[in-house]
Image (tube, grey):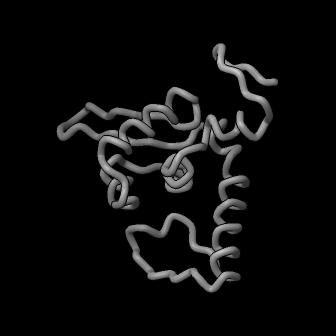
């Protein structure tokens, strides 16, 4: 059994899911392989609501996977998000998950990829 912050996890997989579980965390992380402003993230993931994106970003920051930087030197306020070195350790896992999704969809004949320059977080072909 694994314990973090007085929460218990039965196996390493459940512990991993604490960090990347949910519908949007992995998508947000893969979009943050390169530093992005909040507005760029919203544009990259148009299906996520602002509230959900804000909550997920806060959780990812609390878990130490991403860093939030607020630039106040001149208006307008600029907020950027980027992966921490801890978050970057997830890139091979996220890439493998994305590849599995692509391969599975293609194998089952259910994948239909429509190019969208604003949403291309990871292109697999």
Q: Which residue is nearer to you in this view: 68 or 63?
A: 63
Residue drawn 42% across the image and 67% down it: 119
Vertical side of 125 occupied by 34: above or below: above
Horizontal relation, residue 68 to residue 29: left or right: left
Vertical side of 91 occupied by 110: above or below: below
Residue drawn 63% across the image and 35% down it: 18
Return the x and y of residue 1 as percentages of the image width and height: 82, 24
Q: Which residue is nearer to you in this view: 24 or 70?
A: 24
Return the x and y of residue 112 as percentages of the image width and height: 52, 83
Vertical side of 4 occupied by 37: above or below: below
Residue drawn 30% across the image and 51% down it: 39
Return the x and y of residue 94 as percentages of the image width and height: 66, 55
Quadrant location of residue 14? top right
Return the x and y of residue 3 as percentages of the image width and height: 73, 20
Residue drawn 54% across the image and 45% down it: 22
Q: Residue furthest bottom?
A: 109
Q: Which residue is nearer to you in this view: 32 or 2?
A: 2
């Amino acid at each position: 059994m694994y314990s973090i912050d007085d929460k218990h996890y039965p196996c390493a997989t459940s512990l991993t899911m604490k960090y990347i579980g949910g519908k949007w965390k992995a998508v947000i992380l893969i979009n943050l392989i390169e530093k992005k402003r909040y507005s760029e993230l919203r544009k990259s993931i148009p299906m996520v609501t602002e509230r959900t994106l804000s909550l997920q970003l806060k959780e990812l920051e609390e878990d130490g996977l991403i860093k939030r930087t607020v630039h106040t030197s001149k208006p307008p306020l600029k907020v950027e998000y980027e992966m921490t070195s801890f978050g970057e350790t997830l890139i091979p896992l996220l890439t493998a998950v994305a590849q599995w999704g692509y391969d599975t969809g293609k194998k089952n004949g259910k994948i239909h990829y429509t190019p969208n320059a604003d949403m291309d977080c990871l292109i697999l072909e």
